[in-house]
Amino acid sequence: MKGTTASALLGALSAVVNAVPAPDVDARDVDDRFPYTGPAIPVGDWIDPTVNGNGKGFPRLVEPPAVKPATANPTNNINVIHLSYIPNGMSIHYQTPFGLGVDPQIQWGTTATDLDYQATGYSHTYDRTPPCSLVAAVTQCSQFYHEVQIGGLKADTTYYYQISAANGTTASDVLSFTTARDVGDSKEFTIAVLNDMGYTNAGGTFKYISQLVDDGAAFAWHGGDISYADDWYSGILPCADEWPLCYNGTSTELPGPAPVPPEYLVPLPDGEIANQGGPQGGDMSVLYESNWDLWQQWMNNVTSAIPYMTLPGNHEATCSEFDGPGNILTAYLNSNITNGTAPEADLTYYSCPPSQRNFTAYQHRFRMPGSETGGVGNMWYSFDYGMAHFIAFDSETDFANSPSSPFARDVSGDELLPKENETYVTDAGPFGFVGNYSDSKSYAQYQFLQKDLASVDRCKTPWIITMSHRPMYSSQVSSYQKNIRNAFEALFLEYGVDAYLSGHIHWYERIFPMGRNGTIDASSIINNNTYYTNPGKSITHIINGMAGNIESHSILDEGESTLPLTAFLDFEHYGFNKVRFINETAMTFSFIMGGDGSTMDELTLLKRPNGTCSTGSNGTSSVYPTSTSTSAGGWNTTASSTATGVVSYTTEVVTSYTTYCPGATTFTAGSSTYTVSEATTLTITNCPCTLTHAVTSTPPSAYPISPASIETSLASGLSSASIYTPTGTSSPSPAAETTISGSLILPGKLTSVGITSATSTNPGGAISGTSSAPTSFTGAAGRVEAGSWAGLVGVAIVGLIW
């Protein structure tokens, strides 16, 4: 849709100690050339179509505000507090139903009793539907948003602050935050990563993220689909066959095995109909804005304690994505017909109230460091924490063929703007400059990413983690994945991005390391749960859209199976990722289940050295030597030829070294024996020690899966795939039949990993492979894991010996 960048300063900023100046606000135009013709306030409840509730049907849900008001009948209140990083400081965002009458102020200091400094910020608002003046409970509505940034702070330091009272609000308690670590700080840290979190089905995720906060998590990173406010209508759409969730109290259907959660067995209140919602009338409420309020207030204990970084998903775009049976929403939003039908679905950009279009609520309800880092507002930005660089970008708008269309893609002929019926309800953006709508490289977002990646010092921040809402690869294939790959994959590979995190699909899926356009990088797979990074060659992809929401799980249809690129899949358990950065060469991704807090799946990601920055900050040598080292400097190298290339075995005598043990093991180093009971990092100083490493002088090429296979034939689900060698490749051709078995000596590790026997055949130049241990289903039916990475798709035959 049409978008402009305006310098609309929404509030003045007073000059105070260490206060960060208010940035120019990226204002979005909401196009209103055609009138909104729906109800003044859409309410998704036919028996209780009121703002405040008439007592019929499901109860309206509430959560306590961030600040408990000092009086029983407050006239204003601080309902939400939200922290986020800015460079060398912290942004404190808070929300009230009404204005403050003055610039927002925060008292802060280095101890809880000495709040000696004052920071002043700015406020902004929008004409939400309904306005807070129509909401009875002052403590359950937010319409004014206040931003105070405190800069010039010391790294990795705890500060204390209190939000001042103004215009009827009560001052907050004295709260605290801890700033980000300095760039290059190599101390271990942990973060929470989540996607697709509403209110329904998310209680377990909330519980264990809160526990992680108590245990010292640095920050949380939410990759879109926040609150599911746009599912306000779930209580008025009847159940549909294609919808995986139907709540009616007697024949509830949920993906996965029994038992059905007890809350889904509660009988319907009088007058309510079976609908696509969850218990108590849908996700949270029956009003779009009230859903936002409820979710944000529920999350206060997390968002006020640690920085909670966000990025946009499809559920933030507008008030609706699609219609339901009978086209009930078309009748209601276009013609103000309640409980009616329409002959066809006809939701346009103008079907939603103006305040519920174009990411408006998302833009106001959060404050990310786009303006400070060269990005755009809450849409794309970056930040550093210790040894890692994090990049958030927008997979909904601002690249060629993005899922949400700008108006420029809706026009026909010589039109400059589309007609009403040429638009779609999810039209949005662009948020940045665009030179050519069909060329992603001409978009401001791409240029930000390129500049940001080029500026990263990998000696200080060896880890680069990117996240957007939608995945590039999945066993649930969709056209948007190819469009995202076309826009960004080559750029991320060029700059050695280590991992790409996403959600959108409501399951947990861990992908094997992927090169461009469907290449499984077998040379980087140590085993099913341990990968190497391979800068410039492959990226690790993890999808976790399982935080919990009204729409329940995504599932494989009957008869479908995972694609060869999927290492692990679960579509039964809600949860999130606990991501642990151990040191410059090791990190882990753990899928934490919301049911009991246990770990469903874990991936260890290891780095080979880059030859320049292989010495850790503690002064000991990295456990992974450079593959280019030979006999000089104490190295001794021997090599042996195999059918798949040349493997070099190298020994090194060191005085100390650091190693990562991904699990329980016992080993001897020097004159000492070490017993490890769990994953940990060890620094061995009882040396001299001799290390033996297996390295590949010429890493084997990873053969790509045919793009056509990924996009079409593999969508039906195959247990193996044809692999081909592109014309002109110099990749080695295996013998007609090669059987490989044995164990690998892992570079830098004092243990070995067994390899399941595998057989490769080479009929007619195409390579295909099967494993003696075929892909298996382990545990519950909703959890799929590759039984042997050697039997993936035949690609591992080339990568078994390095």
Image: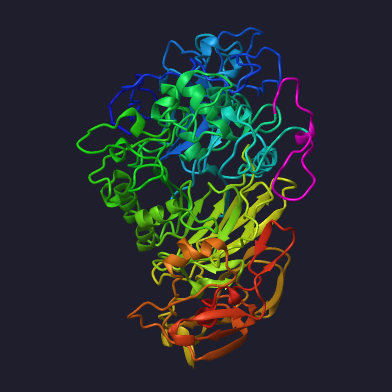
Identified at 58% across, 26% down, the residue is: 291
Identified at 70% across, 63% down, the residue is: 678
> Which is nearer the eye, 520 or 590?
520
Residue 703 position (above or below residue 648): above
Residue 316 position (above or below residue 568): above
Determine the image quadrant of residue 36: top left
Residue 180, image x, y percentages: 49, 43
Magenta span includes 77 = no
**Span highlighted in magenta in the image:** 250-273
Magenta span includes 264 = yes
Residue 7 position (above or below residue 621): above
Residue 317, image x, y percentages: 45, 34
Asked whether residue 14 appears in the rendered view, the answer is no
Residue 432, image x, y percentages: 30, 39
Q: Quadrant of the N terminus?
A: top left
Secondary structure predominantly adopted by residues drawn in magenta: loop
Residue 725, image x, y percentages: 41, 79
> Which is nearer the eye, 514 or 279?
279
> Which is nearer the eye, 624 or 772?
772
